[in-house]
Amino acid sequence: MFKTLFLVLSLLSILYGKIIPASYQIKEYLPLLRGKRVALVVNHSSMVNRVHLVDLLRKKRVNIVTIFAPEHGFRGEADAGHTIKNGIDKKSGIPIISLYGKKKKPTKRDLRDVDVILFDIQDVGVRFYTYLSTLHYILEAGGRYKKRVILLDRPNPNGYYIDGDILDKRYSSFVGLDPVPLVYGMTIGEYAKMLNGEGWLSGGLKANLKVIPILNYTHNSRYTLPIKPSPNLPTAKAIALYPSLALFEGTVFSAGRGTDRPFELYGHPKYIDKSFSFTPKSTKGARYPKFKNIRCYGVNLHSKSVVKGKIDLSYILDAYRKYPNRRDFFLKNRFIDKLWGSSRLRKQIIEGWSEAQIRDSYRKRVDRFKKIRERYLLYK
């Protein structure tokens, strides 16, 4: 069955230039796993056609000793920010170790019976998407404990542009560890090569890293994900708007969690324009949304055309202008600073800067990053 599947995929790739994620190319990485004790860093997005990578490798008699679970858990159903617990995968009986609970990094004990770490998670090309931080710590662990890391690359749906300010290391957190723009224009495999090559891992550690590339992919490719990468990014439009609307997570506004259109709308109970309203409810993946069961007024972007290829700051600037108590617009914990990577955006909004002025303020920093990025590109 599997031989036939991969033969068909290979022929489609050759004949039609179909984009083929690395996980589908099992002949490229299966020999690297033979006779090894393997730990997988995977979640619900780690699919090969309709088969989970765990199930595929077990049928190929790969010795999987551990599964590491990132934010949202191995099955991808937990709320954003919700603690993930250790456990056992009921289907395979393989132990699951959480990397989104009491610890974010694999320990020496976690890896004592591991030879190879295999990473296969779909990202969306945005710095505050926490799977990047999980990757950072996996590479550190690989370097520190001398474990080989094999990364199965996947297309980036936001990989065709670069935008947003560079993270100031003073604002490093699990929602942004590395000095890159908010949207960095790289696949997760290219990003891993950059982490390794630029000495950004703790103490200048370097992992023994092998990236299995995507077939027929370029940074001009437009790629629609076949599965939602996390519970609150269910559509291509939500993924495209995520870099812009997730900034509302650092404000008193809702970005639509708890609705059927998360990250396609935003609002607040005191928003001035009452022409559109929504009421967040407890839902799978958003049990405790902001303004649960309270009517909010705001903007619905679901049926509107969206400017692609940039972060649209007009949404947050407009919301700030239309909120009656601007002094309380940003959350007191300054989470917006962690999301943006510095305090600059918050201060610029308060001071009344225009979108064009804000963009000009980070242009040179982004240009310097682009020169770094060039060294690690696998795809043009």
Image (cartoon, rainbow, N blue to C red):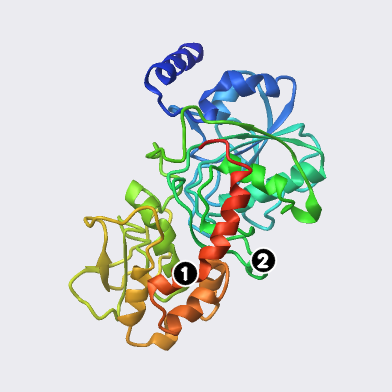
Q: Residue 169 carries which label?
A: 2
Query: On the rendered structure, is 322 left or right of 119?
Result: left
Nearest the eye: 306 or 134:
306
Q: Look at 37% across and 88% down and name the residue there.
A: 325
Label 2's element? helix
Q: Look at 50% across and 30% down and name the residue there.
A: 21
Badge 2: few (under 14), some or many (20 or more) residues near its Cα, within 10 Å?
some
Mark 1 and mark 2: Cα distance apart in space: 21 Å
Q: Residue 73 carries which label?
A: none
Q: Residue furthest left?
A: 275
Q: Look at 36% across and 59% down and name the residue there.
A: 263
Residue 156 spot, x, y in % from top left: 47, 43
Residue 174 spot, x, y in % from top left: 62, 60
For the residue marked with disc 2, what is the amino acid? Lys
Nearest the eye: 16 or 264:
16
Q: Quadrant of residue 294?
A: bottom left
Nearest the eye: 218 or 131:
218
Q: Residue 360 carries which label?
A: 1
Q: Nearer the viewer, mark 1 or mark 2?
A: 1
Badge 1: few (under 14), some or many (20 or more) residues near its Cα, within 10 Å?
few
129 to 28, vertically: above or below = below
61 to 152, vertically: above or below = above
Mark closest to the chain's N terminus, 1 or 2: 2
Is residue 85 visible from the viewing direction of this image?
Answer: no
For the residue marked with disc 1, what is the amino acid? Asp
364 to 191, vertically: above or below = below
Query: On the rendered structure, is 354 left or right of 185?
Result: left
Residue 78 spot, x, y in % from top left: 49, 52
Is residue 196 visible from the viewing direction of this image?
Answer: yes
Label 1's element? helix
